[in-house]
């Protein structure tokens, strides 16, 4: 693989990595806020014993689970990107 191609690929991987890290930062903020909301909804559901409050708590908990799953996907993608960057840097050096 040519040097210029390696450098171009490394730049592309760096851009993707930055984008994923920013998405991860945003997801972490959303996760914290929604986890607090889910906890509060769960408490409200226990106190009120109203079916609508229980449904709201379950919905918030599902949303937190989806955010957690997306976060895990991003972390895995970052690990793979870093491994690919290391491989390309070894080829370049």
Image (cartoon, grey):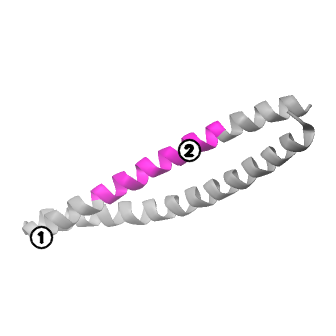
62 relative to 2, above or below: below
Horizontally, residue 72 falls left or right of residue 55, namely: right
Q: Secondary structure at mark 1?
A: helix
Disc 2 crowd, CA 10 A, few/some/many (<14, 14-19, 20+): some
Q: Position of residue 25 (x, y in %)?
A: 58, 59
Quarter-of-image position of residue 24: bottom right
Closer to us: 17 or 92: 92
Q: Earlier in the sequence, mark 2 or mark 1?
A: 1
Q: Which mark is residue 52?
A: 1
* Residue labelled with disc 2: 75
Indicate the position of residue 86 as horizontal and vertical percent values: 77, 33
Quadrant housing the C terminus = top right
Is residue 78 part of the magenta span, yes or no?
yes
- Taking 77 as reference, is 71 left or right? left
| Image coordinates for residue 68, horizontal then vertical, percent | 42, 50
Residue neighbourhood size for the residue with mark 1, other residues' Cα within 10 Å, grouped as few (<14), some (14–19), many (≥20):
few
Q: Which residues are magenta?
A: 61-80
Q: CA distance from mark 2 to mark 1?
A: 35 Å
Magenta segment main secondary structure: helix
The x and y percentages for residue 19 are 65, 58
- Residue found 71% across the figure and 35% down from its top: 84
Image position of 15 (left or right of 42): right
């Amino acid at each position: 693989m040519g040097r210029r191609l390696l450098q171009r690929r490394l730049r592309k991987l760096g851009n993707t990595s930055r984008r994923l890290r920013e998405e991860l930062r945003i997801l972490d903020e959303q996760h914290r806020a929604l986890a607090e909301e889910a906890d509060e909804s769960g408490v409200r559901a226990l106190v009120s014993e109203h079916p609508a409050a229980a449904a709201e708590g379950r919905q918030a908990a599902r949303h937190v689970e989806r955010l957690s799953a997306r976060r895990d996907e991003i972390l895995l993608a970052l690990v793979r990107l870093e491994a690919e960057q290391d491989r390309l840097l070894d080829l370049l050096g």
